[in-house]
Amino acid sequence: MAHLRIGSRGSQLALWQAHHISDLLRAQGHTVELEIIKTTGDKITEVALSMVGTKGMFTKEIEEALLDNRVDLAVHSLKDLPTELAHDFEIAAITKRENPRDVFCSARFNSIDDLPKNANVGTSSLRRQAQLKALRPDLKIHPLRGNVDTRLRKLEAGEYDAIILAAAGLYRLGKTQLVRQVIPVEVMTPAAGQGALGIEIRRGDIATRQHLAFLDDAAARATTTCERALLNKLGGGCQVPIGAFAEVANGRVLLSALVAHPDGSKVIRESREGADPVKLGNEVGETLLARGGDDILEEVYGSGFAVPQQP
């Protein structure tokens, strides 16, 4: 058995994730210690993430700790991990996936359709903003940063009529009291990798990889690999208006994806199935680019699309 050091961000959700992996490792007979590491994304709290544009903003400092041998593994929300890791690292395991969908949270309204005209909705995700505006152009979208508790507190205080969050984080923390609607994928396509945890290690650390092998879920590996291949083909990170959702059925992968203009004026969707997750992700990505996704993404990357101010 081994003594394993885990690097993690210090947010409530990140710590839940790290403790969850710790418990699973201890059940295998390992001893575990946890090192909390503050990342760039944790330090920038007043600016919408889509305006920052730093790839790996939630992972860079943790990877430095891995490289310096201060920790043996890092537990990430997979959607925070860049699609192309530096050569020094590898993803040793992708855990069984929690619900990857987004949820509509509100103290007063039961769904997106129920919102009154010009309602205030909180999200700092251009992906969510674009799909909301396509569905309801009248809605007023406002930035929403902070941990899960902070976001829910702002909602309860009446700063927003509704907020959109990832189902996985709320379910993991048991904070589902304000969830009113699990949003269907065809209405709001999730972020690539949403709901899965990625366990990162130093490349070539065979012993640690073997210790973590039991955590790797085949279905989660196939679906997220497909989604991340698409995201990589489009050149995007988790803060751009790209959605990807894959499922495994009868040994094949089904992928639904989109590229959308942040103002909702143009939404390009594509669905396809295939046997090879990476090939499928690349093919759907190429199709989206050819159908106009390249123009949308060029505008987003080139201008740093503005997210509206706080209400």
Image (tube, rainbow, N blue to C red):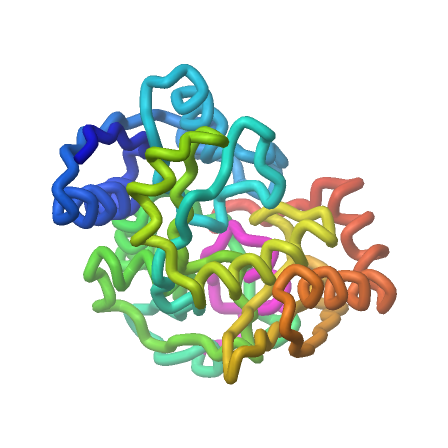
User: Which residue is at the front of the view, 87 or 107?
Assistant: 87
User: Which residue is at the front of the view, 35 or 275?
Assistant: 275
From the viewer's perspective, is 60 left or right of 243? left
- Quarter holding the N terminus is top left
The mark total stands at 0
Q: Residue at image x 57%, y 41%?
A: 82
In the depicted structure, whether residue 243 falls above or below residue 52: below
Q: Is residue 116 magenta?
A: yes
Q: Residue at image x 40%, y 65%?
A: 162
Image coordinates for residue 158, horizontal then vertical, percent: 32, 58
From the viewer's perspective, is 84 left or right of 293? left
Span highlighted in magenta in the image: 115-133
Most distant residue in the top direction: 68
Q: Residue at image x 22%, y 61%?
A: 175
User: Which residue is at the front of the view, 107 or 84?
Assistant: 84
From the viewer's perspective, is 148 left or right of 299? left
Image coordinates for residue 163, horizontal then vertical, percent: 41, 61
Image coordinates for residue 308, horizontal then vertical, percent: 59, 49
Q: Residue at image x 51%, y 32%?
A: 89
Q: Is residue 26 visible?
A: yes
Q: Is residue 160 visible?
A: no
In the depicted structure, whether residue 57 falls above or below residue 160: above
Image coordinates for residue 51, horizontal then vertical, percent: 61, 38
Q: Is residue 268 magenta?
A: no
